[in-house]
Amino acid sequence: MRTRVKICGITRLEDAMAAVNAGADALGFVFYPPSPRYIDVEQARRIVAELPPFVTTVALFVDADRERIAEVVQNLRIDRIQFHGNEIPAYCAQHGRPWIKAIRMKDDVDLMQMSRDYQGAAALLLDAYKPGIPGGTGEGFDWKRIPVELAGRIILAGGLDAGNVSSAVRSVRPYAVDVSGGVEISKGVKDQEKIEQFMRGVELGEK
């Protein structure tokens, strides 16, 4: 099965189109103001309006209130919601969209239990744990911690770039990989060549 690719932290139309043209399956938009990759609703709406069909749009939130999520979902085409905070399963399921739950890989995380707790999630996104930072740390974690039986519902994130994504795909066989900082020139600004190199790395890992 082909490994899907999500490019997260999109803030500019040219970056979105570079990702789409390179073959990315999904684009992520960060609606978390403290993030250097934050985008407001109007900026995101302009980008999403230009996207071709069959590109999945993902809105990322961190412990956002219901009104904030509704504002985003009602004002632009959002296909998936990604929760990166301490949201409980019942809250994640209340917003009228399929959802993804990000799991920060602390030492004591039991992924099998998390999979049961968040069984309503379309996927679990696994990211490195760094105190005080809900995601986008640019750091990795030990892929051996991922149970083989969960690989099909895993989106692998955390420090991925063109140099290591082949190994990640080969080792984990995740449903998808997620990259942000690994294809940037600066936070929130993507690099077309890095995106293309990343996509080639994914393909190489599948062989």
Image (tube, rainbow, N blue to C red):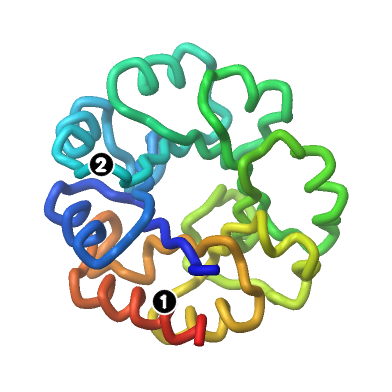
114 sits to left or right of 76: right
2 or 1: tag closer to the N-terminus: 2
Residue placed most toward the observer, 161 or 58: 58
- Mark 2 touching mark 1, by CB under 8 A? no
Three-letter code for the amino acid on which mark 2 is drawn:
Pro
Residue 174: image tag: none
Three-letter code for the amino acid on which mark 1 is drawn:
Asp
Q: Quadrant of residue 18?
A: bottom left
Q: Quadrant of residue 94?
A: top right
Residue placed most toward the observer, 206 or 100: 206
The residue at the point 17 percent across, 33 percent down is 49
Element assignment for label 2: loop
User: Residue 67's spot in the image, x, y percent?
Assistant: 47, 12
User: Label 2, label 1: how many angstroms apart (C-alpha)?
Assistant: 26 Å
Q: Quadrant of residue 58?
A: top left
User: Disc 2 marks which residue?
Assistant: 53
Element assignment for label 1: loop
Give neighbour class at mark 2: few <14, some 14-19, many 20+ (Cα, 10 Å). Answer: few
Give neighbour class at mark 1: few <14, some 14-19, many 20+ (Cα, 10 Å). Answer: many
Residue placed most toward the observer, 105 or 206: 206
User: Residue 204's spot in the image, x, y percent?
Assistant: 44, 86
In this rendering, the label closer to the viewer, 2 or 1: 2
175 sits to left or right of 91: left
Q: Where the N terminus falls, by quadrant?
A: bottom right
Residue 147 drawn above or below residue 86: below
The residue at the point 25 percent across, 64 percent down is 186
Circle count: 2
The residue at the point 58 percent across, 72 percent down is 140
The residue at the point 84 percent across, 43 percent down is 116
User: Residue 36's spot in the image, x, y percent?
Assistant: 33, 49
Residue 42 drawn above or below residue 198: above
User: Disc 1 marks which residue?
Assistant: 161
